[in-house]
Image (spheres, helix red, strand yellow):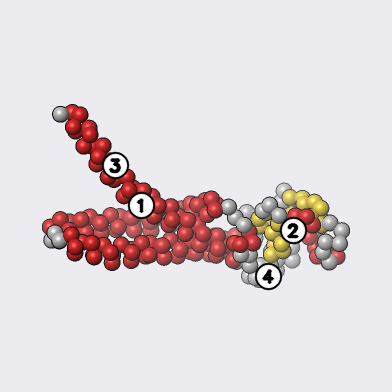
Amino acid sequence: MKRKKIYSLQNVDQKKIPELASFLVIVFALLFIGGWSFAYHYFDNFNVGLSALELPKEDYFIFSYWVLIDHAGKLIFWGLSLYLALWGLDYLFRHWINNSYTRFHFFGIILPLAILSLFAISYSLGTSTADRRFKAQKLNHYPAYPSVEIYLAPGAAPKQLSQSLKSGCYRQLIQNKDKVFVFKPIKSAPQAEISTVVIPINQLHAMRLLPERKVCN
């Protein structure tokens, strides 16, 4: 008898594997969308596109962590609401809808709409977090980004730009394998639109990260 019970439990677990896999796929897709939306809108404030940044795909899941932190209360509320909605549907099907054909068509309409709504919500939360965090950075003169002195290779840029990059007024936004992205916050015009300078690595002679954040007029 014990062997039969163990065998039946194993069968139940195996039946749940596809459902669990589908659930995890949706969760990871939602995290990816939220992180991608955050990155897209955040770096758009610096007038930089994601294609130029060449971010690793794993970074979007890291960005999604900030989205989760910023909207933890909303996510808990929506999670509880979704649980209650699923519980209500389960009760409805058990007591009122016994026809499998009706169930199939019902889920065929409800599930795609529910999944699309979740993706839209994830995208919206990523946008909200990006705007909030960028405004916080701007308000405090971008404390997350170090001031840099950049020395270009001879003839790599006009003399005026080369001298400006050496001043230490620029901040390092991000660096990938072949480009460095820097921007210059202006103290006298904090609301001015950010202009980002993209420097190819092969034109960079040296770059010095400064211990203090410098804000120039």
Query: Which quarter of the rendered picture does the C terminus lie within?
Result: bottom right
Rendered residue at 21%/37% (across/down): 8
Amino acid type, mark 2: Pro
Residue that label 1 marks: 22
Amino acid type, mark 4: Ala
Mark found first going from the N terminus, 2 or 4: 4
Rendered residue at 64%/62% (across/down): 52
Residue that label 3 marks: 14
Mark found first going from the N terminus, 1 or 3: 3
Residue that label 4 marks: 189
Badge 2 density bin: few <14, some 14–19, many ≥20, Cα 10 Å: some
Q: Secondary structure at mark 2?
A: strand
Amino acid type, mark 3: Gln
Q: Position of residue 44 (x, y in %)?
A: 59, 66
Mark found first going from the N terminus, 2 or 1: 1
Rounded to the nearest angstrom, the CA distance separating label 1 from label 3 is: 14 Å
Residue 85, which numbered label? none
Residue 200, which numbered label? 2
Indicate which label's residue lies in the foreground, 2 or 1. Answer: 1
Q: Secondary structure at mark 3?
A: helix
